[in-house]
Image: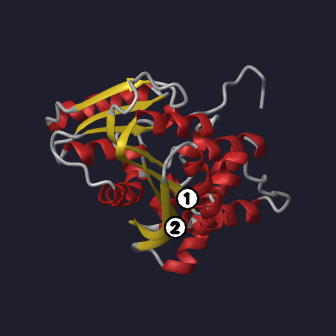
Amino acid sequence: MSDNIAPPTWDDYAGIYEVVHEPLTRQFAATALECAPVRGGDRALDIAAGPGTLAMLAAARGVDVIAIDTSPRMIARIQERARESGFPGIEARIMDAAQLAFADGHFDAVFCIFGIMLIRDYRAALAEMARVTRPGGRVVVVMWNGLERMEHVQVWLRAVATVFPQFAPAPPPENWSVLQQAASLRRAIEAVGFSTATIHTETRWWEVASPAWFAAHADLSPAADMLYRGLGPEARGQVRRELERQLRVRHGDGPFRLAAEAHIAVGIR
């Protein structure tokens, strides 16, 4: 990758996230809300909010939600969705999760749905979550249970490896290594001041319309884009064709589903 080419970020995928990724992540966000049952009049914070998946679900319950993200396009999309849905209780701000601009104990609940591993200083972010949660309030962090238990990632990686036999996945960064393990995720949450932390792991299903649809959309992420840059200009098309071929062999031409596991960690302040 040339030094003058900026690395891809989720800002580049703000327009497509709801179509591709949200049907899966929304399922875990709904479970997170059940683990911290906020209601009308409560104040909630949605950290690394993306296009506002959890914020929209919480606002539908009458909760006052502040959604933060470092992506200006994601924040703009949250604001647009809030207007379209008639949810005046959603406020969206660009903000660093490791430096929250809120008073101590300001929120009844704090949520982070598949964002904690993207925050460079995740320990500082967890400490800030604890600081802004009121005594007795809850934090809910949802984190993937390892790439090997994300079937939608594995089928794509198999296609990459078929087209590029020399390909070897890089080891996960520290954030992933620590946070994808239930025990170390629990320790990280308890270390910042939550009195208790419980973790349960659940499976959800990505309902896919067809192999052709999945092959055209599964690689719309910063990680995939970075990988393709290293493999060459033809890589995306080659991998997509092989992925579609493999999925057709396995599932035929029609709908199918892929499993994904995630930890749902709940800390009590």
| In this view, 209 is above or below 94 | below
Which one is earlier in the sequence, the residue at label 1 or at label 2?
A: 1
Q: Residue furthest right?
A: 166
Name the residue located 59 percent from the left edge and 34 percent from the top edge. 124
Looking at the rendered structure, the kind of residue marked 2 is: Glu
Tally the marks: 2
Please tell me whether mark 1 sits on a helix, a strand or a loop: strand
Name the residue located 65 percent from the left edge and 67 percent from the top edge. 148
Label 2 near label 1: C-beta < 8 Å?
yes
In front here: 150 or 211?
A: 150
| In this view, 88 is above or below 240 | above
List the residue tagged with mark 1. Answer: 144
The answer to whether residue 242 shows anywhere in this view is no
Q: Position of residue 104 (x, y in %)?
A: 40, 28
Q: Is residue 52 left or right of residue 21?
A: left
Looking at the rendered structure, the kind of residue marked 1 is: Trp
Q: Is residue 102 left or right of residue 263?
A: left
The colour scheme of the drawn protein is: secondary structure
| In this view, 103 is above or below 134 | above
Estimate how packed mark 1 is, as few (under 14), some (14 to 19) or many (20 or more) residues with alpha carbons within 10 Å.
many
Q: Is residue 212 left or right of residue 92?
A: right
Name the residue located 62 percent from the left edge and 39 percent from the top edge. 123
The answer to whether residue 40 shows anywhere in this view is yes
Estimate how packed mark 2 is, as few (under 14), some (14 to 19) or many (20 or more) residues with alpha carbons within 10 Å.
many
Please tell me whether mark 2 sits on a helix, a strand or a loop: strand
Q: Position of residue 121 (x, y in %)?
A: 64, 34
Between marks 1 and 2, how big is the CA–CA gap?
6 Å
Q: Position of residue 138 (x, y in %)?
A: 38, 49
Residue 261, numbered label = 2
Q: Which image quadrant is residue 65 in? A: top left
Q: Is residue 210 left or right of residue 107?
A: right
Q: Position of residue 171 (x, y in %)?
A: 78, 53
